[in-house]
């Protein structure tokens, strides 16, 4: 019997609602596969911050390190200035737990509509590996003469060879594990960002030639990637890129696969504790209405099981979700459509958990 300690962080708005359904489904898969899950709930988010002024204490990070994984609902409160919770909880957790990979599957499932004309599930199935802890988002830079006509603002993109290499290694390994077309595409901007992406490109080809001769290597500028993700998504198997470009193209990927209601991602430390989350926000206006689609959070739970090495349980969850989507029970992804078709957040979770238990 496998046993895991999972930290649960519902967060804000509808985050606790979707997280509850993800946990319900993950527990159903765990029961089928002889897995024991010990969960700990944490209330970090806007309500706690407004009540106590506390965002994320140092003790919380120490406690997170004692868990096998973190499963998150959503962060973002309408009464808290944007950036306070996101930087104080999400970015701090990513940086201090060294979750240096953001892993984003972009997969179109049956009965999910994509805005791309004449493309189906057979065309949209790739993964973006985003460097998650360096680059522009680390805050190198500063401001001088703020508020004057001569104000200067500077923010620097800084990468070390170590940071680049460990991200590339993870991406090559993903391409090899997927065994789809065995192709890894580096997304950069070598014609303008000539220092940083020269480093990325040289490291990319050196590692590929020495350690991954079975993986085909391709390169594309980020602007070309955004065009091809819409025009020819079937061209891609695995894409690897830096922090800023990855942030942008993964949101495009979420739309390509049918919207934020189904997109999930992982913040990965292959040697430590990783955090999994739905890509969509906290949707505060729907809080307590029981109409938010929990599929993205359920898929985040599925990613967590896969990361923990519980492939059978992860496959059960994915199969149950696909079975649910094929059944036509859910006619749309939005809160409005869920309400109109007579479904609810909890009913979707119950339905998928039941399918996991009976498949």
Image: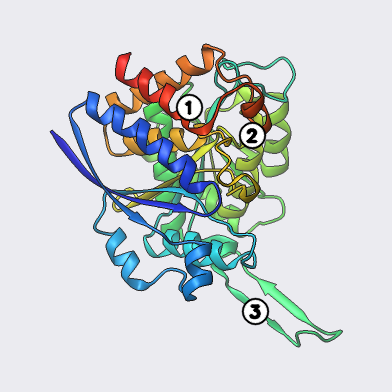
Regarding mark 2 in the picture, which secondary structure is present there? helix
Residue 100: quarter of image: bottom left
Regarding mark 3 in the picture, which secondary structure is present there? strand
Residue 231 lies, in percent from the top left, at 73, 25
Residue 357: quarter of image: top left
Q: Is residue 58 left or right of residue 324?
A: left
Q: Choose the circle earlier in sequence order: 3 or 1.
A: 3
Residue 238 lies, in percent from the top left, at 51, 33
Residue at 32% x, 35% y: name it: 305
Q: Choose the circle earlier in sequence order: 2 or 3.
A: 3
Residue 336 lies, in percent from the top left, at 68, 32
Residue at 60% x, 41% y: name it: 250
Q: Is residue 207 visible?
A: no
Gap in angstroms between the C-alphas marked 1 and 2: 13 Å
Regarding mark 1 in the picture, which secondary structure is present there? helix
Q: Which mark is residue 142?
A: 3
Q: Which mark is residue 335?
A: 2
Foreground of the two, 142 or 64: 64
Residue 102 lies, in percent from the top left, at 48, 47
Crowding at label 1, few (<14), some or many (≥20) Cα neighbours within 10 Å?
some
**In the depicted structure, whether residue 283 falls above or below residue 133:** above
- Where does label 1 land, which residue? 347
Please identify, in this view, whether the residue under mark 1 or under mark 2 is nearer the observer: 1
**In the depicted structure, whether residue 138 falls above or below residue 12:** below
Q: Quadrant of the C terminus?
A: top left
Gap in angstroms between the C-alphas marked 2 and 3: 41 Å
Please identify, in this view, whether the residue under mark 2 or under mark 3 is nearer the observer: 2
């Amino acid at each position: 019997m496998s046993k895991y300690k999972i930290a649960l962080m519902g967060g804000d708005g509808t985050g606790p609602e979707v997280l509850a359904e993800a946990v319900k489904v993950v527990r159903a898969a765990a029961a089928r596969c002889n897995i024991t899950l010990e969960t700990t709930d944490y209330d970090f988010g806007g309500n706690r911050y407004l009540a106590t002024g506390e965002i994320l204490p140092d003790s919380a990070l120490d406690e997170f390190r004692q868990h096998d994984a973190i499963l998150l609902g959503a962060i973002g409160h309408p009464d808290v200035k944007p950036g306070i919770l996101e930087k104080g909880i999400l970015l701090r957790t990513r940086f201090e737990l060294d979750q240096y990979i953001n892993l984003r599957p972009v997969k179109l499932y049956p009965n999910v509509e994509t805005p791309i004309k004449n493309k189906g599930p057979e065309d949209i199935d790739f993964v973006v590996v985003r460097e998650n802890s360096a680059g522009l988002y680390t805050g190198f830079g500063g401001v001088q003469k703020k508020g004057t006509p001569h104000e200067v603002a500077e923010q620097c993109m800084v990468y070390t060879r170590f940071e680049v290499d460990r991200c590339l290694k993870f991406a090559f390994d993903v391409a090899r594990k997927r065994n789809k077309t065995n192709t890894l595409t580096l997304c950069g901007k070598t014609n303008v960002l000539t220092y940083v992406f020269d480093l990325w490109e040289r490291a990319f080809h050196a590692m590929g030639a020495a350690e991954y001769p079975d993986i085909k290597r391709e390169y594309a500028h980020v602007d070309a990637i955004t065009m091809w993700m819409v025009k020819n998504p079937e061209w891609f198997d695995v894409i690897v890129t830096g922090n800023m470009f990855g942030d942008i193209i993964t949101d495009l990927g979420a739309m390509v696969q049918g919207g934020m209601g189904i997109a999930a991602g992982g913040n990965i430390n292959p040697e430590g504790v990783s955090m999994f989350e739905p890509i969509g926000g906290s949707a505060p206006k729907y809080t307590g209405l029981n109409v938010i689609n929990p599929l993205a959070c359920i898929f985040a739970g599925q990613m967590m099981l896969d990361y923990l090495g519980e492939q059978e349980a992860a496959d059960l969850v994915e199969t149950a979700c696909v079975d649910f989507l094929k059944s036509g029970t859910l006619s749309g992804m939005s809160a409005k459509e869920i309400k109109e078709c007579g479904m609810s957040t909890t009913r979707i979770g119950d339905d998928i958990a039941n399918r996991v238990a009976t498949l």
